[in-house]
Structure formats: structure tokens, C-alpha cells
Image: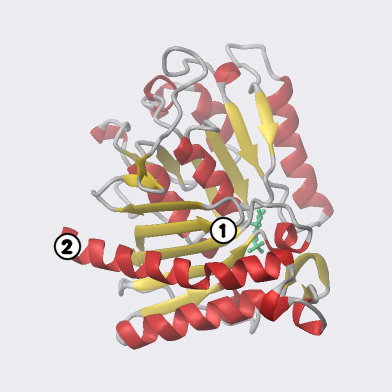
């Protein structure tokens, strides 16, 4: 029910705010995380591009222990408890909290402010509640299914399009993406090929995107789409904890998402909507602002479908 979703959202907001000061301590290296090994960035499984700090583990522990007290019957998937132990998680229809305690750990370690806490809740495997808190920027993004999306209490999106109307071409779109932490030759090559195509292609009815940005945090990227700063976010390789919360925030801000097999969003015509549940578990995500001219006709060769959905 809407009341139940509102209550879940309130819990997630309270938790994000509770751990906010610890997050900032870690970012500025003051307080509890001022010195010593506590703060060292530890590579995950020998991958220097994928790291974890004591702050990630601390925050995840606090969030999960609080949630377990309040909702003992719920399930929990977290970046540090799941990824670190190499646990395979089983996705069920039960209410499941999907948490990244520090999304953009690389940014966190390098003092780049696009980093934050991402708390999502799925029911029947689909995200229904999302909170992204970027403590350094003091931005709290919130959404629940059917209840809209907000930034610090203000309805999303905040910004209108840089053109006077909704874009009709990719050339009017700003895009955010990531190169991710998987650094195999084939992986990097396929991403770079896609970026190259998006930046260069102008022929055959195609168009180049206006610009390409990387924040280093999937959650921040989705927040920027919901806010109206970026029109498109695309990435292959992130995990559900990186984007569970962001996906519902984008959807509730009026945007749409493509998960590799279908589209969801209020601007997608009924007959074009995916009949499947939205899949946030297969590490592929394309999210766009409300742009009916670009995303309203997925079957009819629209530009986003042609240029990006194929890559997803
Ligand atoms: C990472 C960030 C990054 C994305 C990676 C994620 P983490 O999350 O969101 O932008 O490219 O796919 O794993 O590891 O910093 O929480």
C-alpha cells in the first residue's frame, strides 16, 4: 500500500541521515576515521580499480543491523556483505533491501564529491523505494513507487531541458556513463567502441550526443538524470546495489529505463512496455529523462533504441 511504501521510505531516509556524519568523517578524514589503517583503501580481489574502506563496511553494518531489527522477515543484499565474501545472492520476491554503503568508493578515497549512500528496496524483484544520499553535496534523493521523486523535498526533475522542448535528437542530449572497474581488454574495447559511436556518428539519421560525462558513481549518475542535469545514463557492469535506488528515483521523476530486454516508464506507450518484471539483477542499465520523442517509440527505430539499447 502507499502508506507501507511511505513507511519504508521514511526508514531508509532516517538510516541514510544517521550514517551521513560517519560518511563525511571518512570523506574528510576527521573524527572516527581520521587516521591509520581504518581508512586504507583495500583492493577487492587484487583489482586496484575496485576498492573498499573501513567506512563502507561500517556503514553497511549499521544499516543492515537497524533494518534487521525493524524488518526481521525481509531479505538483504549489500555490496560489502555480498560482494566481499563472494556470496551468491538468491533473488526472491520477498521485500529485499539492496544497499551500497559507499557508491563511488574510488571517489570517496580521492575526495571527489560524487559519492554517497544508496538504499533500495525491491518487492517482487522490482525496485519500489529508493534513497540516494550524497552527504558531501548535501543532496538527498528520495522516491517510492507511485509517490513521486524528490531532491531535498523538491519535486524532481529540478531542471528543464536546455532546449525549449523535450529533445527530438540525441544531439541535444548530455550523457553520463562509466568505464567501470572491470578492466579486461574486451570489456574496455566494447565500451570505448560504444562511446566512439555515440560521439562520432552523425550519418544515416543518427546523431552524436552533445557531451559525455563520468561522475564515478552510478548512483550519482542516476540522480543527475532524475534531477535533469543529464538526459541519459548508460552502463554495463554495475551491480544491483549501485542502481536499485536510482532506477526508482528516475522512474518516479518521469523518466524511463531499459534493462536489456524491455522499457519501463510512464512515457512508454502501454503496448511498448515490457511484459516482464524490470530486471535490476543483470548488470545492464540505460536510464533516460522524460523524452517522449526519443523514447516513446522503442519499436520504430527511435534513436535511443538504435544507438544505445543495442549496446545494453
Ligand atoms: C561503482 C561505481 C562506478 C561504477 C561501478 C560501480 P562502488 O560502485 O558506481 O561508477 O562504474 O560499476 O561498481 O564499487 O564504488 O560502490
Indicate which disc residue 135 carries. 1
Q: Between residue 131 and residue 243, name the one nearer to us.
A: 131
Judge from the rendering whether residue 221 lies leftward or rightward of residue 200; answer left or right. Answer: left
Instruction: Tell me if I can see residue 190 in this picture.
Output: yes
Q: Residue at x 64, y 51 (%)?
A: 114
| Quarter of the image that includes the N terminus | bottom left
Q: Between residue 251 and residue 273, name the one nearer to us.
A: 251
Q: State whether label 1 is within 8 Å of ligand 1.
A: no
In the image, residue 279 sits, relative to residue 35, either above or below, namely above
Q: Residue at x 46, y 29 (%)?
A: 159
Indicate which disc residue 22 carries. none
Residue 264 falls in which quadrant of the image?
top left
Dot 1 falls on a residue whose secondary structure is loop
Residue 5 in the image: state x and y as whole percent: 24, 62
Of tags 2 and 1, the one toward the viewer is 1
Residue 214 in the image: state x and y as whole percent: 69, 42
The local crowd at label 2, few if under 14, some if 14 to 19, many if 20 or more residues have their Cα within 10 Å, is few
Mark 2 or mark 1, which has the lower sequence index? 2
Q: Count the marks.
A: 2
Judge from the rendering whether residue 239 lies leftward or rightward of residue 261; answer left or right. Answer: right
Judge from the rendering whether residue 167 lies leftward or rightward of residue 82; answer left or right. Answer: left
Dot 2 falls on a residue whose secondary structure is helix
Q: Residue at x 42, y 14 (%)?
A: 165
Cα–Cα gap, marks 2 and 1: 27 Å
Judge from the rendering whether residue 102 lies leftward or rightward of residue 231; answer left or right. Answer: right
Residue 128 in the image: state x and y as whole percent: 32, 58
Where does ligand 1 appear, by image quarter?
A: bottom right
Residue 101 falls in which quadrant of the image?
bottom right
Residue matched to label 2: 3
In the image, residue 76 sits, relative to residue 307, either above or below, namely below
Amino acid at each position: 500500500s502507499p502508506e507501507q511504501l511511505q513507511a519504508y521510505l521514511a526508514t531508509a531516509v532516517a538510516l541514510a541521515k544517521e550514517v551521513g556524519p560517519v560518511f563525511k568523517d571518512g570523506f574528510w578524514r576527521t573524527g572516527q576515521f581520521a587516521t591509520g589503517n581504518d581508512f586504507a583503501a583495500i583492493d577487492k580481489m587484487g583489482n586496484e580499480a575496485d576498492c573498499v574502506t573501513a567506512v563502507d563496511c561500517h556503514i553497511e553494518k549499521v544499516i543492515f543491523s537497524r533494518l534487521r531489527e525493524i524488518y526481521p522477515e525481509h531479505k538483504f543484499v549489500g555490496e560489502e556483505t555480498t560482494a566481499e565474501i563472494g556470496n551468491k545472492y538468491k533473488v526472491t520476491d520477498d521485500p529485499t533491501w539492496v544497499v551500497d554503503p559507499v557508491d563511488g568508493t574510488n571517489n570517496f578515497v580521492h575526495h571527489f564529491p560524487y559519492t554517497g549512500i544508496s538504499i533500495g528496496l525491491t518487492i517482487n524483484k522490482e525496485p519500489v523505494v529508493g534513497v540516494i544520499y550524497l552527504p558531501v553535496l548535501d543532496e538527498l534523493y528520495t522516491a517510492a513507487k507511485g509517490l513521486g521523486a524528490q531532491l531535498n523535498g523538491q519535486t524532481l526533475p529540478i531542471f528543464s531541458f536546455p532546449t525549449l522542448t523535450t529533445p527530438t535528437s540525441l544531439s541535444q542530449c548530455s550523457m553520463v556513463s562509466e568505464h567501470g572497474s572491470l578492466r579486461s581488454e574486451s570489456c574496455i574495447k566494447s565500451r570505448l567502441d560504444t562511446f566512439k559511436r555515440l560521439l562520432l556518428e552523425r550519418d544515416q539519421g543518427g546523431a552524436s550526443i552533445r557531451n559525455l560525462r563520468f561522475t564515478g558513481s552510478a548512483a550519482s549518475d542516476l540522480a543527475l538524470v532524475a534531477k535533469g542535469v543529464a538526459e541519459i545514463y548508460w552502463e554495463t557492469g554495475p551491480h544491483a546495489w549501485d542502481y536499485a535506488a536510482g532506477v526508482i528515483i528516475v522512474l518516479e521523476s518521469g523518466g524511463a529505463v531499459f534493462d536489456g530486454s524491455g522499457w519501463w516508464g510512464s512515457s512508454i506507450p502501454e503496448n511498448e512496455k515490457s511484459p516482464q518484471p524490470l530486471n535490476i539483477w543483470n548488470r545492464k542499465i540505460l536510464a533516460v529523462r522524460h523524452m517522449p520523442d526519443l523514447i516513446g517509440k522503442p519499436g520504430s527505430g527511435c534513436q535511443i533504441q538504435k544507438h544505445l539499447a543495442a549496446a545494453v
